[in-house]
Image: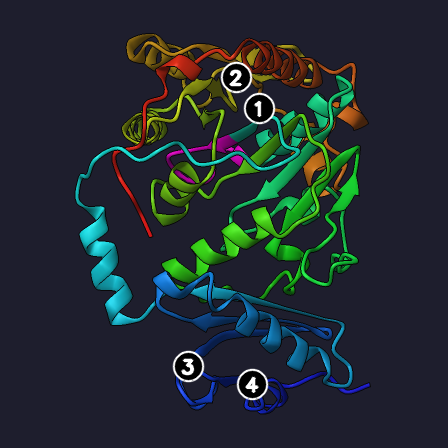
Amino acid sequence: MPEVTTQQVLDALKAVEDKERGANVVTLGMISGIVVREGNIGFSIEIDPKDAERKEPLRRACEDAVRRIAGVVSATAVLTAERPAAREAAAREAAPQAPRPRPAGIPGISAIVAVASGKGGVGKSTTAVNLAVALALEGRRVGLLDADIYGPSVPRMMRLQGQPELAEDGKTLHPLENHGVKCMSIGFLVAEDTPMIWRGPMVMSALEQMLHHVVWGGLDVLMVDMPPGTGDAQLTMAQRVPLAGAVIVSTPQDIALLDARKGINMFNQVSVPILGLIENMSYYVCPHCGHRAEIFSYGGARKVAERQGQEFLGEIPLVAEIRETSDAGRPIVVSEPKSESAEAYRRIARRLLEKLETGAGEAQRRAPRIVIH
């Protein structure tokens, strides 16, 4: 069957009228960011943020219209706020205001943990995946949300393909699962080499819908693989999601540690407890002669943790097996469970469980001071 085209999607959406504005959503210029992949369609509907709840039926109507196209397997629409009025409102809201209540919890999820880094290339996603699987090996019910919209890596690292199935209610999706971990990623909906040319509000809306419109079931821990840096996505998760805390991943060299400190300060500013720091690629041991080399320096993350008053969770060595098993979709904690690296991940996972189960850091959390829409 021929691939569904963008024009077919637009033609179908012309049948959906925004009754409040008296015209169809295409004519009104509300549709953007259309992605087509093997019959799986994703797109954005631009609205004023204050209308989000009222426009939910319109979003569902758009999805239904696209699903009726021959050859469409799934259709996912996200509500975004990219209008000038929305940007002005966001600017007003960005100013310091009176504290707001902590975001409400997500039914069935006991704790949500963000795995973050100040910069890319430090092994954050590899760490998030191995920690999630290690937690599952400890007998916990675990989910993994790939919040890196621009560079999703969870599908490959967890060896997951295909698209999430629509739940019985016709509104939510079932996550994919492997190694005992339930996973959701934008990478399940778009081709691996398809760039996500989305602006900040579109990304934030997609994140919220992947979090709230997924049938996670009962989870002890939901790990969130955050995008690198300290931008919109991180602030959205910190402000709108009841995070139990954040884990900061860094390599030992000075430039990475500088960005790690920025990450710590960002989470402190939005009152999210830091559960601890991890030093990745900490050292290299030659598999032939046993010589140890500290390629990227050593111990920097531990020193930053001490200076910032945070816990140092552990160090992960620089070994080829971690990269190879991640690329193959078999995290080292399951493919080589007796290796030094697997033991390091599992020690950190057990320590995280201790902190989560005792509520460590919760008393540090204050009501957020910054509001991002």
> Identity of the amino acid at label 1?
Leu
According to the picture, the residue beneath numbered tag 1 turns out to be: 318
According to the picture, the residue beneath numbered tag 2 turns out to be: 283
Residue shown at 40% from the left, 45% from the top: 236
According to the picture, the residue beneath numbered tag 3 turns out to be: 20
Look at the image and give the residue range highlighted in magenta.
114-124
Say the numbered circle drawn on residue 16: 4
Q: CA distance from mark 4 to mark 1?
A: 54 Å
Across and down, in percent, residue 53 comes to 47, 61
> Identity of the amino acid at label 4?
Val
Label 4 or label 3, whichever lies nearer to me, is 3
Along the polypeptide, which appears first: circle 2 or circle 4? Answer: 4
Q: CA distance from mark 1 to mark 2?
A: 6 Å
Vertical comparison of 124 with 13: above or below:
above
Label 2 or label 3, whichever lies nearer to me, is 3
> Identity of the amino acid at label 3?
Glu
Q: CA distance from mark 1 to mark 3?
A: 58 Å
Q: Secondary structure at mark 4?
A: loop
